[in-house]
Amino acid sequence: MRDIVFKNLTSTDHHKRDVVLSEAFVLNGVTTKTQKHFTYFVRDHALMHSPEELTEWIKRYASKGPQLKDLSVVKSYDSKVGEEKFEVKIIGNLYVLRDQDIYSVDFIQEFRIDRSGDGLKRQRKKL
């Protein structure tokens, strides 16, 4: 059986949005839990009235392009306890163009997998 939880939370001022997707299931004696967590912050907003303004804004800001500020990957495995953990975390910045509005958005994206159970324990050899 799979348990799935989905949360989509928006702050009252609409500058922050959290999206969380969690899933848990058991297969062959191993419990697996996954979680995807996305957080977005609108940092800056500009309204463009003409194509020239858009061109100038792109030259000034977007020429840098989206920036990846941090990427981390962590994996751990304990065969005695029967646990395995894996996590990826990405922090960055991107630009969104919608009609005549341009938004600068910072983001954090996390993905976690936790596995535990007797199926992951290392079997000791008998002499």
Image (tube, rainbow, N blue to C red):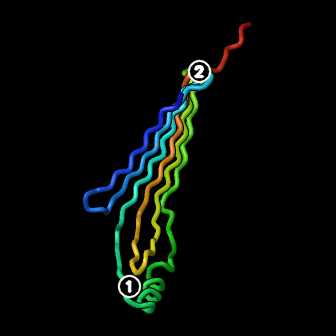
Q: Residues within 10 Å of mark 1 (few under 14, many from 20)?
A: some
Q: Amino acid at mark 2?
A: Gly
Q: Position of residue 63 (x, y in %)?
A: 51, 80
Q: Position of residue 111 (x, y in %)?
A: 51, 46
Which numbered tag is attached to residue 48?
1
Q: Which residue is depicted at the point 60% across and 24% down?
A: 79
Secondary-structure class at tag 1: loop
Q: Amino acid at mark 1?
A: Met
Secondary-structure class at tag 2: loop
| Residue linked to disc 2 | 29
Count the marks: how many?
Answer: 2
Q: Nearer the viewer, residue 64 or 8?
A: 8
Farthest left residue in view: 12
Q: Nearer the viewer, residue 82 or 98?
A: 98
Q: Position of residue 74 (x, y in %)?
A: 54, 43
Q: Nearer the viewer, residue 54 or 114?
A: 54
Q: Earlier in the sequence, mark 2 or mark 1?
A: 2
